[in-house]
Amino acid sequence: MKRALVTGGSGFLGSYLCERLLADDHEVLCVDNFYTGAKRNVDHLLDDKRFELMRHDICFPLYVEVDEIYNLACPASPIHYQHDPVQTTKTSVLGAINMLGLAKRVKARILQASTSEIYGDPLVHPQTESYWGNVNTVGVRACYDEGKRCAETLFYDYKRQHHLSIRVSRIFNTYGPRMHPNDGRVVSNFIVQALRSEDITLYGDGSQTRAFCYVDDLIEGIIRLMATGPEFTGPINIGNPHEIQVRELAERTIRLTGSRSRIVHRPLPEDDPLQRCPDIGLARSVLDWTPTVELDTGLEQTIGYFRQMLTGTIH
Ligand SMILES: NC(=O)c1ccc[n+]([C@@H]2O[C@H](COP(=O)([O-])OP(=O)(O)OC[C@H]3O[C@@H](n4cnc5c(N)ncnc54)[C@H](O)[C@@H]3O)[C@@H](O)[C@H]2O)c1
């Protein structure tokens, strides 16, 4: 039985990863400082003897015995990561150093949850892993983008210098149940506004595109990446290449919720990328992975979750 450490394990993606690892018969140590995560996301796992939840900030060293480390800890939405930008960079950079140090000590394989944001406002479309990105180093998103870029650098330097077994996934927009209701991300924003019959706020004219990956698909990709042979490290894009305009997402959300909300326009936020879409050729060939959940299906699941949350069935 492998022992896996999931940092950020009580967050949106981390909680699904913990579930999946338990289903695959791992022991799971979930480490989280609950900055954006919630105990309710892993409540249902607490009775499992193979699961352990530990409050800890990865900006500080951690001494545990594990075989695999999935480093997911980091606030992921602009509202949260811009709330305390210094802490965001610390989490990415000091957190990576601490987790890589742990991996070195206990000879664990370590996977980094990197992000499509390392491509910044991309000049190449769709984004391939060989594209180096277009990031504003002094903008309000830099704490996240540059923190994640530095973490990637650290992963590759620990591999070169200390021969660590590393994996780097570049995660694109992912959605599903357990997203935060108030984190400003477009899927959760639209659904919550539609369910409350509030105006749906569309930034700009809504022609900017995004590609949305359902959480189950994303977790499958991460699990396959961790299991690849020793020669493969990534970085590898994991996301859904089905690109849609944000305006269309708003319209679909209204249709699927049966809402009477109206769409209203607001100015585009600073440094908001206009296009974002993964090239997943590498994931298809190396991981034999491709997303399978249709957008409407995933949205229905997510709408069901938020409906329960707003009616008080989930707290
Ligand atoms: N969801 C996406 O679309 C997406 C896209 C790209 C990358 N990612 C990456 O995936 C990871 C998980 O994202 P998510 O959407 O689940 O976000 P999330 O905010 O739900 O989860 C992040 C978790 O990390 C915890 N955390 C934050 N700082 C910490 C610290 N210093 N020490 C310990 N725990 C800490 C939070 O409490 C939370 O539980 C993040 O690293 C994020 O950058 C997510």
Image (cartoon, rainbow, N blue to C red):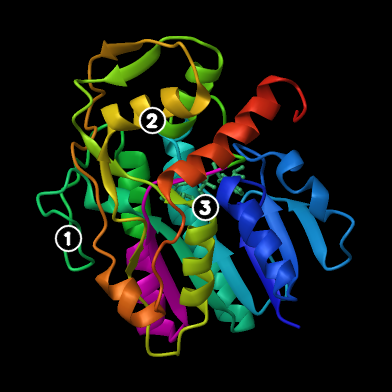
Residue 88 position by quadrant: top left
Asked whether residue 111 is in view, the answer is yes
The residues bearing labels 2 and 3 have C-alpha atoms spaced at a distance of 19 Å
Give how far across and how far down residue 22 sits, in percent. Answer: 74, 68
Within 8 Å of ligand 1, the CB of disc 1?
no
Q: Amino acid at mark 3?
A: Val
Mark 2 against mark 3, which lies toward the viewer? 2
Label 2 sits on a secondary structure element that is helix
Query: Per the image, is 156 magenta?
Result: yes
Residue 115 in the image, given as x and y percentages of width and height: 36, 54
- Among numbered discs 1 and 3, the one appearing first in the sequence: 1
Residue pictured at 60% horizontal, 54% vertical: 14
The amino acid pointed to by label 1 is Trp
Label number found at residue 252: 2
249 relative position to 119: left or right: right
Between label 2 and label 1, give the one nearer the viewer.
Answer: 2
The magenta region covers: 152-176
Kindly identify which residue carries mark 3: 215
What percent of the width, then of the height, locates residue 216? 54, 57
Residue tagged 1: 132
Please, what secondary structure does the residue beneath circle 1 have? Answer: loop
Picture quadrant where residue 207 is located? top left
- Mark 2 residue type: Arg
Disc 3: residue Cβ within 8 A of ligand 1's nearest atom: no
Q: Are marks 2 and 3 in contact (CB under 8 Å)?
A: no
